[in-house]
Image (cartoon, grey):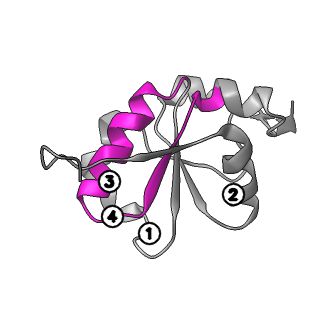
Amino acid sequence: MDADGQHVAAEISAAEAIERVAGNDWMLDVREQYEWDRGHAPDAHLIPMSMLEQRIGEIPEDVPLIVVCQSGYRSWTVTKALVAAGYDAVNVAGGMDAWQSAGGVVVLDGASA
């Protein structure tokens, strides 16, 4: 928590996210379906930010979470909420844009890009 009692979420680089997902951290993609369809990390799990409250039970509580959106803004908000709820979650700085720039695999309709 910060000095004002607000929950603080950590942020990691896309390169670190790539390493951590390879090490079995659970990747949560909070973009909308149409964004996911344009490309996503191969082992990510899609739960759009708009559906998070209804689908929170699908998120494991016993593994570290890597949270991503397209640019890192929505995932930052979701990460803060997850941390406040007791999850071990970090945000990917720069989102999927940074993920792809850092060499992360992106799956497009069953093929890799």
**Residue drawn at point x = 32 percent, y = 56 percent:** 83
Q: Quadrant of the C terminus?
A: top right
Look at the numbered disc 4 and give the secondary structure of its residue. Answer: helix
Q: Position of residue 54 (x, y in %)?
A: 26, 50
Which residue type carries mark 2? Answer: Val
- Pointer 4 and pointer 3: residues touching (CB < 8 Å)? no
Residue extending farthest bottom: 62
Mark in the foreground, 1 or 2: 2
Disc 1 residue crowd, few under 14, some 14–19, many 20+, Cα 10 Å: few
Q: Residue at x 27, y 47 (%)?
A: 81
Q: Name the front one of labels 4 and 3.
A: 3
- Mark sitting earlier along the chain (3/2): 2
Residue wearing tag 1: 60
> Can residue 42 be seen by looking at this rendering?
yes
Circle nearer the N terminus (3, 1): 1
Distance CA(mark 2)–CA(mark 4) = 21 Å
Counting other residues with Cα less than 10 Å from the Cα at mark 2, is it few (<14), some (14-19), or many (20 or more)? some
What's the residue at 44%, 45% (across, down)?
47
4 vs 1, front mark: 1
* Residue holding disc 3: 82
